[in-house]
Image (spheres, helix red, strand yellow):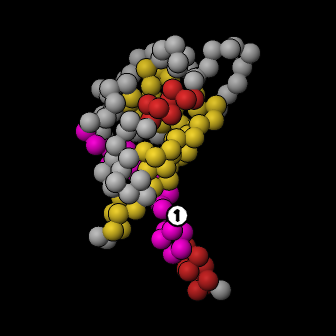
Amino acid sequence: MSILLILFLANLVAFGGASVTSQEQFTRLRESGSPELNYNFERAYLEARANANCPSNSKAFFFIRISEEGHVNSAKGHLVGLSADSRRLRLKWAAGLLKQMHFRPLMYGAKRSSVDMALTLVCTDGLARTPLSYP
């Protein structure tokens, strides 16, 4: 039974890419990040400056696929909270912004791996740190 479990987990890594936390992945963010974003390591979410596409205090949850080269291939978003207010985060705008990020590749030994990551995006009036600051 334990051999089947090991083989199953090995197949997930070999064919499906790895799943990592957003905190782990953002330590691999390349310096040429977007000036409109800031990763908050203390709260483990990505902050975007509030604007017409991203009203203050709106939130969305994204599933992001990062290629072996470190480029964001897909960003599928879901709104976290709905209210009677028609002002809410524009998912297509946010996905386009996320696809501009580039990461250093995740390495397993000498082999690069694609990465799946879950991420919360929060729109804020003011960014607490410099854009895409590192721990």
The C terminus: image quadrant: top left
Residue named by callout 1: 16
Asked where in the image residue 81 lies, by quadrant, the reply is top right
Q: Is residue 121 above or below residue 87?
A: below
Q: Is residue 20 left or right of residue 106?
A: right
Residue at 49 percent of width and 49 percent of height: 65
Q: Is residue 111 above or below residue 1?
A: above
Report if residue 27 lies within the magenta region: yes
As shown in the figure, which amino acid type bears the numbered disc 1?
Gly
Find numbered disc 1 in the image and state the secondary structure of the residue it sits on.
helix
Q: Is residue 7 above or below residue 103?
A: below
Q: Residue furthest left?
A: 31
Q: Is residue 14 left or right of residue 4?
A: left
Pick whichever, 18 or 122, lies toward us. 18
The N terminus: image quadrant: bottom right
Magenta span covers which residues?
Answer: 10-31
Query: What is the x, y in percent for residue 41?
Result: 40, 39
Residue at 52 percent of width and 64 percent of height: 16
Query: What is the x, y in percent for residue 124?
Result: 48, 20
Residue at 51 percent of width and 68 percent of height: 15
Q: How many marks?
A: 1
Can the viewer see residue 122? no
Residue at 52 percent of width and 18 percent of height: 53
Q: Is residue 86 above or below residue 129?
A: above
Query: What is the x, y in percent for residue 47?
Result: 45, 28
Q: Is residue 17 left or right of residue 130?
A: right
